[in-house]
Amino acid sequence: MPKKISDSNRNDRVAAKVQTIVAEILRDKYADDPVLSGVSLVGAVAHGGLQFVRLYFYCRTDDIDVAQRRLDIETKTIRFLMGQQIDQKYVPQIKFTYDDTLERAAKIDELLNNLK
């Protein structure tokens, strides 16, 4: 009997859907919040049988720790609101992680410029 072909893009689709829904929640429900209004979601990765999604964010303010703490505090509420919009059997757990790609790229550019 042939092996069942799995849909390898499902993780990506679920992650993208969760990212879109959470971004809309942040935009609509937290527009007046001075900390969370400066947060942008830049990526998402689904794990654990689609029951866990790690959301990567970038913060336009300098105080990343405050943004991380606020997101951690609001995670339960955001997940509840997401559960009202998502069309899956289970609402995935979400975890916010700061994406420091821009800072690392700037540091690499600086190091390369110093070599000249």
Image: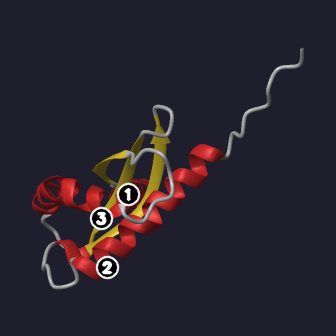
Which residue is rendered at x = 30% and y = 64% of the image? 81
Residue 13, image x, y percentages: 60, 54
- Camera sees residue 107: no
Residue farthest to the bottom?
32
Q: Quadrant of residue 110?
A: bottom left
Q: Quadrant of the N terminus?
A: top right
Using the image as rendered, state which of residue 85 and residue 95 is in the foreground: 85
**Which disc, if any, is residue 20?**
none
Colour convention of the picture: secondary structure
Q: Local crowd at mark 2 within 10 Å, few (<14), some, or many (≥20)?
A: some
Q: Earlier in the sequence, mark 1 or mark 2?
A: 2
Mark 1 is on which residue type?
A: Asn
Residue 35, image x, y percentages: 14, 73
**Which disc, if any, is residue 81?**
3
Q: Earlier in the sequence, mark 1 or mark 3?
A: 3
Q: Earlier in the sequence, mark 3 or mark 2?
A: 2
Mark whose residue sits in front, 3 or 2: 3
Lateral position of residue 87 relative to residue 39, left or right: right
Q: Secondary structure at mark 2?
A: helix
Q: Secondary structure at mark 3?
A: helix
Q: Which residue carries the number 1 mark?
A: 114
Q: CA distance from mark 1 to mark 3?
A: 48 Å
Lateral position of residue 69 relative to residue 36, left or right: left
Q: Which residue carries the number 2 mark?
A: 27
Mark 2 is on which residue type?
A: Arg
Using the image as rendered, state which of residue 102 and residue 93 is in the foreground: 93
Q: CA distance from mark 1 to mark 2?
A: 40 Å
